[in-house]
Image (tube, rainbow, N blue to C red):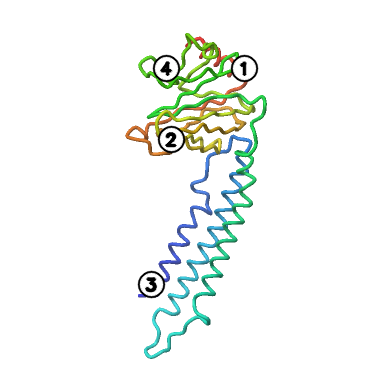
Amino acid sequence: MAKIFAVTIVLIAIGSAIPILMHTWDMPQDISTHGHLIDEQYADTMAEAGISFLVSQFLLAFFIWKFSSPKPGAKIKSFPGGAAGLVIAAFLLVGTEVLALGVFGAKAWASVYFTPPAANALPIQVQAGQFAFYFRYPGPDGTFGPLHADQISEANANFFGLDTTHDQDSKDDIVSAEMAIPVNREVHLLMHSKDLGHSFYVPELRVHQDFVPGLDLSIHFTATKVGKYEIVCTQLCGLGHYNMKAYLEVKSQEDFDSWIKQQAALQ
Ligand SMILES: [Cu+2]
């Protein structure tokens, strides 16, 4: 019986490694300048964790196979010095592994979070709320007008709470339910939530950032490939969560300029 169990462990371990080695569930093509760092980190983590997983499962199977049915009367052996040495060794091994991944990953993390956006980055404000994203562009003046929470009104399509009669800076602001950006230009995304926790995830961009109520968060990235990509919310935010999405269109500079003009005319 114990031998069947040992064989089953080996089969499950190998079976779960196959789709990873075959790249069955790979990420979609990367369309960002920072994405390769994230992908390398994923690959390193997967290799380290995967090898450790396989080695530990094979060892487990080996010990079960060899020691699970001792002969009657056989003396049960114990590891010299007891378990303390093994526990300390495992602690150091796993600790070193996690620490090493952290040190290697710091480069990818820092390139996204610890560097300021370029001075000419395009600022876009994104607001998440149950169950939609809205995007705001500052218009020709390059300045966002202030927000007035009490003026937020779905009925008047005033999703951000702008006061375009009194606030000069808000007059030319452009609000859209779609996000468009120019290719090969850095975007500075300014994020806030209207209600509770949401998330902004574009797998192709390798951008995945939570919205935290009460915090103004920002992230910057550069898209390198024209196309249409899905933006999804990955925080379970209520009954409509499954349908909370928007589209990101990466356009050439000329297409982006005409899109902005079109949107401005719609305000
Ligand atoms: Cu959501």
Point out the tag, 2 or 3, that comes first from the N-terminus. 3
Q: CA distance from mark 2 to mark 1?
A: 32 Å
- Select label 1 or label 4 by which is in front: 4
x and y, in percent, of residue 28 in the image: 53, 39
Q: CA distance from mark 1 to mark 3?
A: 65 Å
Q: Which mark is residue 254?
A: 1
* Residue marked by disc 4: 158
Q: CA distance from mark 2 to mark 4?
A: 20 Å
Q: For the N terminus, which image quadrant?
A: bottom left
Point out the tag, 2 or 4, that comes first from the N-terminus. 4
145 relative position to 3: left or right:
right
Type of residue at label 3? Ile
What residue is at 43 percent from the left and 85 percent from the top? 76
x and y, in percent, of residue 119 in the image: 67, 26
What residue is at 49 percent from the left and 68 percent from the top? 58
Point out the tag, 3 or 4, that comes first from the N-terminus. 3
Of 47 and 186, the residue lying toward us? 186
x and y, in percent, of residue 67 in the image: 43, 80
**Secondary structure type for disc 1:** helix
Type of residue at label 4? Asn
On screen, 127 above or below 58? above
Q: CA distance from mark 1 to mark 4?
A: 28 Å
**Secondary structure type for disc 4:** loop
* Residue marked by disc 2: 198
